[in-house]
Amino acid sequence: SNVSILNNTPVDQVLLYTLTAEEGFCSASADVQVTVHPIPQANAGDDEYICFGDDFQLNASGGVSFLWEASPWITPGDEVLANPLVTPLANAEFVVTVTDAVTCTANDTIQIFVPEEFTVLEDFTTEVCFGICDGEISLEPNGSWGTIQADWAQVADNSFDLIDLCAGIYD
């Protein structure tokens, strides 16, 4: 038996196998032609970082039909779309099976990274006496990605804790 081992190529490969049977001085042979189709180039897209609560459009390619693995973030019925809209509220992995025109399949995976919900706990003085600047604002941000900064419109100090504030509106 002579078996050919092929690499996945972008085009069909046709192989011809001959089976020969012998008994005594008699023999018979038969040819079998096998077409090897390439595996589709499934593509679920690059891994992404999004903000908590944001929608994300998945976008698979490389075939004629698609099937996303079950996920709490994919609306039932949308798992057969190439581009379902999802709103993951935590890190999530999405796996798609791509099928081509001759029913060959391949899988690909995309990771969506989601931070904790961005929240700001605030503590501030609600009453001050006229002419006395003893108000305070304290902010405690939590969640999201990267560095969090305060950017006050009325105050040059961009810290999260402000003291000695006069009555007014601070944003």
Image (spheres, helix red, strand yellow):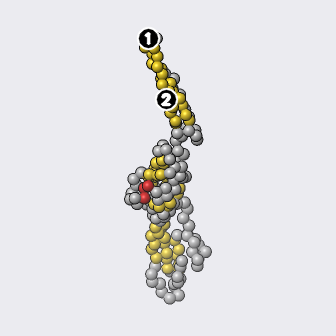
- Where residue 140 appears, as percent x and y from the top left, is 47, 67
Using the image, tell me which numbered label, if any, was put on residue 24: 1
Q: Nearer the viewer, residue 121 or 165?
A: 121
In which quadrant of the rendered image does the C terminus lie?
bottom right
| Residue that lies at the very extreme toward the bottom in this rendered image | 130
x and y, in percent, of residue 87 in the image: 45, 62
Mark linked to residue 32: 2
| Residue depicted at x 47% and y 52% | 66
Instruction: Inspect this view and state whether residue 108 appears.
Output: no
Residue visible at 46% across and 19% down?
A: 28
Residue 152, x across and y down, in percent: 57, 74
Q: Which residue lies furthest to the top in this view?
A: 24
Q: Label 1 amino acid?
A: Gly
**SS at badge 2:** strand
The first of marks 2 and 1 along the sequence is 1
Image point (47%, 84%), residue name: 128
The local secondary structure at tag 1 comes to loop
Vertical comparison of 163 with 143: above or below: below
Q: Is residue 119 left or right of residue 12?
A: left
Front residue (pair 122, 79) = 79
Residue 152 visible in rendering: yes
Q: Which of 143 and 11 is in front in this view?
A: 11
Q: Is residue 22 above or below residue 35?
A: above
Q: Residues within 10 Å of mark 1 (few under 14, many from 20)?
A: few
Q: Which mark is residue 46?
A: none
The Cα atoms of the two marked residues, 2 and 1, are separated by: 24 Å
Nearest the camera: 61 or 141? 61
Q: What residue type is labelled 2?
A: Val
Q: Where is residue 158 shown, x and y percent of the image? A: 58, 71
